[in-house]
Structure formats: structure tokens, C-alpha cells
Amino acid sequence: MTATHHPSDELLLAHASGGAGEAVSLIVGTHLALCPECRAKIARMEAMGGAILVDLAPAAISDHALQSVLARLDAATLEPPVPRRDGKSFTAPEPLRSYLSGDLDAVRWRPVGPGISYRSLFRGRDASAKLIRSRPGRGVGTHTHRGEELTLVLTGGFTDATGHYTRGDLQIADGALEHRPLADPGEDCIVLAVCDAPLKFRSAAVGLLGKLFGF
Amino acid sequence: MTQAETPEPARLNALVVAVAQARDRGAFEALFTHFAPRIKAYLLKLGAGAALADDLAQDAMVTLWRKAALFDPSKASAATWIFTIARNLRIDAIRRERRPDFDPDDPAFVPDADPPADARLMREDDEVKLRAALKELSPEQAQVVQMSFFADKPHSQIAEELGLPLGTVKSRLRLAMARIRTTMGGAS
């Protein structure tokens, strides 16, 4: 099964060029772990970076630079190729798993509404990252966005007016979208969400909860 | 800079492989001479001061020495691989942030289909074709591509700076990427 909803070219390029902040790279990098198709695009974008690097007018490097680098080589620790690690299977792929203490089943959730829990991961330079879990058939309520919200499905699936999203799918919601995502029946829907501004909830009560919990 | 002054990608790839397999210092010096001044130029364009850019260019070359065994010329050219080293060092040293990325050795990683739908082996002439394609982009497309690599800000801010709607910046990027894709022979 592969993803059907992908990051936009500019999101991929922000990740490939190094312009993206940590939260955006976390969600794009985690999508890439699940999506060979987007990895092929990233490879092309990094190749653009290589081509741009080669064509830059060289800057004069300091006279002693080569000697001092050569002097550092003997003490440098070499990194051997790593064999693919098999065995235990995980639901959260890297790079996301490094931000958790264990896999998704070990997350300590904080309830935020009926059937909805969340776990804040970190607040980066220009966006914050959190996990949100909806029980089957539940949703976070109708909301719009002050900025951009990126949502990556990790387990289960959800549906809103824009479509149906399952594991590996990434939804891009901007200020123009008002939506009411509902989790599929049968399985918890866990998503990684990255927002560059707090959400705006239509219901004051949900909005208050959101404020309390840093949603 | 003319074509003749730039060593062929195949030769640069072979130099990294020589470092990986034989710890060849002559090969390393040749790579240093070619890449260190370009890595420094890249960092200067991103706003690093001259002394810091010099230091980080040196660190990038030490990283090349340390990680040479991880270089796989079937996946990326030496220039592309060294670009990713410089990019990551800069984020770490200047922005003091992590740049989370996928790990192909992770058990939860979904490998490429066999045969890969799109990714094919990098050919040595790809880089030459790609450099030519970048030069053939329209000035508007080239500008947003360059800013994507050198502005160190999200595309929304790039759009603001250029006084353009975000949609225009996005569509220029899409057109540029489509052109690159055609050049590289991948499916869209």
C-alpha cells in the first residue's frame, strides 16, 4: 500500500534544500519513509542542489585550510555502512520514532475532548509538531487554520470533505479550508500534525480546550 | 566557469570511492581543491560570515572523509552527496536545529518497489544534463529555484519578498520541477 496524498513540490523542495524548519522536515521525512515515489522526487531535488553547488563561483579558501583538514583526518572516526536492521517491527518509522520514547503504543496521551487525545512533541522555530489520536468514528471538531496545517496519517484513516486519508497520506490544509475530519470506524486514527499557527475552532468549547492544551 | 574547468562527475565519484576504499589522501586533496571553495561559496550565499563559512567548509570535508564508505554512486553523484553534507552541517551549526530525515535501514522503512517505479540508477551524464537544464529555466523559474536553495526561508516568505502571490511562486516551482523531471527521464 502506498500513499495517495503527497506533499507539494514546494514542501519537498523545502526539505531537500534545507530551507524547512525542524517540524516540517519531521513530517516530510516521515512521509518519505513510507513513500518511495516522493523519495524519487527528493533525489532529483538533491541532485539540483549538487548541480547548483558545482556551478557556484568558488570562494577563496584560507591558505592553511587544506593542511589543517589533513591534520584532522587521522583522528576522525570513520562511519562504516550500516546493515539494514530487521526484526522488531514498528508502527512509527524514523525519523518520527526518535522523537518518541518507544513506538506509538508507548505514547502517554493527554485527553483533549471526547475520543480525542494528543501528545505535543516539540515547538520548532516556525512550527509545532504533535501527535493526535482519534478513537474510531470520532473527530476533532470543525476548524479552520490561521496558518498551514500538515497532517500525516500513521494508523487508521480519516475522511473530510477533501477526501479519505490512510497511513502515509499527507494532507495540506491552509487558511481557506474549513474541515471536520472524522476517524474511520474500526481502528484508532493516529496522525502527526504540524501547524505554523494555532487552529481556529468553530465551537467555543472546543476552542477553549484547544487553548488550554496548546492545540 | 567553462565545462573544461569542472572535473567530470565520473572522476569526482571515483575520487570519493578511492577515499572510501583506500583512504587515498591524494584523492581527498583533489576533492578538497574542487569542493571546499564551492561549499564555502554555498555557505556565504546563505549568509554565513567568511570565517564561519571557512570553518564549516573544512568540517564538511572532514565529514566526507569520515562518511566516504556510505557514498553510493548509483544513488547520487559526489556533488549531490557533498551538497547534502554541507546542507546538514549548516542546519546543525547555524540554525541549531535538527533536520529529521528517513532512515533506509529502519525496519519500518517502506523500500522501493522492485523494479522501482521511478527512481532509476543515477547515470554519470545526469549531472551534466541537469546543470544544462537549470541554465535553461526561464529567469522567473530560476529565481525561485535559487531562492529555495539560498534564501533559508519558507516559500510563503519568499513570495512576500518577491511581491508575488504564493500561488505564483508555487506554479513557477512546479514548472521548473516538471522541466527537470523531463531532463532526468523520470516519470512525472
Image (cartoon, rainbow, N blue to C red):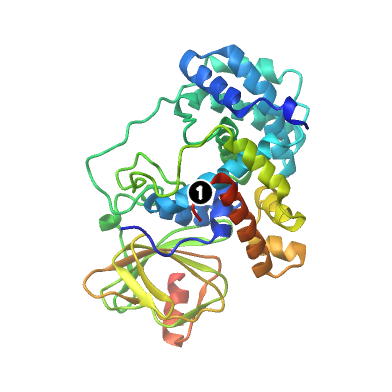
Q: Which residue is mark 1?
A: B186
Q: Is label 1 in a helix, a strand or a loop?
A: loop
Whether residue B158 is situated above or below residue A44 in the rendered picture: below
- Measuring from the top left, give residue B183's x and y in whole percent: 59, 47
Name the amino acid, label 1.
Answer: Gly
- Measuring from the top left, give residue B61's x and y in whole percent: 60, 26
Front residue (pair B49, B137): B137
Residue drawn at x 64%, y 55% is B176
Residue drawn at x 77%, y 67% is B163
Whether residue B73 is situated above or below residue A152 in the rendered picture: above
Q: Is residue A135 left or right of residue B67?
A: left
Please state the chain letter of the residue tagged with numbered disc 1 in the rendered image.
B
Front residue (pair B50, B130): B130
Residue drawn at x 30%, y 49% is A102
Q: Is residue A51 left or right of residue A120?
A: right
Asked whether residue B154 is in view, the answer is: no
Asked whether residue A101 is in view, the answer is: yes
Q: Quadrant of the C terminus of chain A?
A: bottom left
- Measuring from the top left, give residue A46's x and y in whole percent: 56, 43
The image shows a total of numbered marks equal to: 1
Q: Is residue B18 left or right of residue B175?
A: left
Q: Quadrant of the N terminus of chain A?
A: bottom left
- Measuring from the top left, give residue A28's x and y in whole percent: 47, 55
Whether residue B143 is situated above or below residue A130 in the rendered picture: above
Q: Residues within 10 Å of mark 1 (few under 14, many from 20)?
A: some
Image quadrant of residue B58?
top right
